[in-house]
Amino acid sequence: MLQAHSLLWHYLWLAPHIYSLVLVALLMHRGFHRQYPVFCSYLIFASLEGICLYVFDISSRITPNTWWAAFWVGTILEGMLKFAVIGELLHHLLRSWPSIAKLGRNIVSGAGGLLVLLAALAAAYSAPDNTPWFVSGAHVLLQTIYLAAAGLIISMFALAAWLHIPWERPAFGIALGAGLVWCEHLAIWALVSGGIVRNKGWHDFANMGTYHFVVLIWSYYLLVPHKVASPSVQEKNPSLASPLATETREKEIAPWNRELERLIHQ
Amino acid sequence: MTLAYFLVVAAVLAVVSLFYLGISQDFQVRSDANLAPRIQPIDIEAFRNLMDPAEREYLRRRLPGGEFREVQRRRLVAMAAYVRTASQNATVLIDIGNQSLSASDPQTAAAGRQLADNAHTLQVNATYALLRIWAAWLWPDFDRPTITILNSYERLNGSAMLLGRLQNPSAPVRISATS
């Protein structure tokens, strides 16, 4: 079952990319691409890349070297799009909160810097391989990209959790799916680059299966309408969120902010 | 290879956390009507006294070195307790503000957004303040000079926060025992 070119293998390689294209078409029909243009571009590119690589793989006219060249180009371009998606998600997360927007961007950028250092360290300590450089190099490249991308997504979740920043439903769905698939890919490529797993078929199935699952997660979050919160909370307790009540609380925050800033800067 | 294992463990933990987060976000039933009582009023005057540099200087002059450090550390622990409570209050206020974002009344939504934004500033300040307090706990003798440019920022920040605020005589929830 878990063999290359088995029926499941064909399905798992092709199906998520076809579903992604259908998802993008539905999202564009709803005008979603105007809100999340980078994510839509990423989905289109990743799907077309996956389908092209599949066709190259089963075609007898394409040599392995050509396949690997296409894989390298696709991986690098897709990697750049992944970081652009992270930037888009961060923008959506922080755009409504001017007081923490700069801090949030600095924290995620700082995390990015640390992740690049860690990725360089992981690449330097990757286990030597007796395969051609473009095969072992691709494994290290994938480990590097997924380490940085997964780390950045996790740092965004940590930032949102620390400051209780509410996610927009689409941004949350995209970030959740991306986080899951990139973390799983990181684990697999770290095993491969570290020489712990070599020439095993199951890791392809794990990667393809996870991506398939994540496309379904994206479809759920982006297509299924959000359950509207019951207004009963505010109806039961109108003082909780009334403008007057919130202004009163704001007035009480101000002296605390001043005292804490004085303490910080003493 | 050790680094590879570390990355695998970190990635697996992240996947499990994300799964948990995804499930908890989607099936969460909020009981936010009980948010306001979670706010613990704190005495801002007592906090001011604790962080008063003049009082600290007085203690330093009056007490022998070892005793001063011990007393100063106790004062810092008390300060940290105040700051932690302020931080917890900020979290509650952020949740109250976030909750009103979906309100049908635009004025309520805007007020909620403003409240949450200011509470974010308080949360960030509380985190910095805690770091500063724990640094001072480690080195009670260490004096950092006042940075005047940051004091100007403080005044600017205070003015900006007060700007455009409406007066309201009622105070349904207080986060300070005195203000």
Image (cartoon, coloured by chain):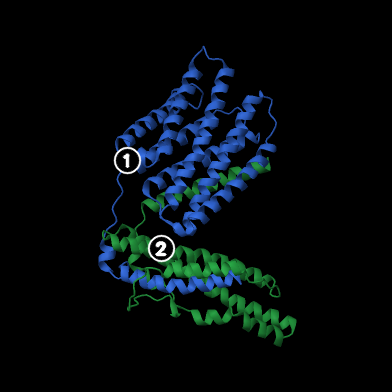
Chain colours: A blue, B green
Chain name for mark 1: A
Q: Residue furthest top?
A: A61
Left/right of residue A59 with respect to residue B35 in the rendered view = right
Quadrant of residue B40 in the image?
A: bottom left
Label 2, label 1: how far apart the Cα atoms are: 29 Å
Determine the residue located farthest toward the right in the rendered image. B65
Counting other residues with Cα less than 10 Å from the Cα at mark 2, is it few (<14), some (14-19), or many (20 or more)?
many
In the rendered view, would you say B38 is above or below A194? below
Q: Nearer the viewer, residue A48 or A229?
A: A48
Q: Find residue B18 and report its horizontal and vertical position in percent.
A: 47, 48
Q: Residue at x 66, y 33 (%)?
A: A195
Q: Position of residue A33 (x, y in %)?
A: 36, 38
**Label 1 neighbour load within 10 Å: few <14, some 14-19, many 20+:** some
* Label 1 sits on residue: A223
Residue to which mark 2 is pinned: B116
* Identity, as a three-letter code, of the amino acid under mark 2: Ala
Direction from residue B92 to residue A82 in the image, left or right: right
Location of residue A206 with respect to B143 vertically, above or below: above
Query: Type of residue at label 1?
Result: Leu
Q: Secondary structure at mark 1?
A: helix
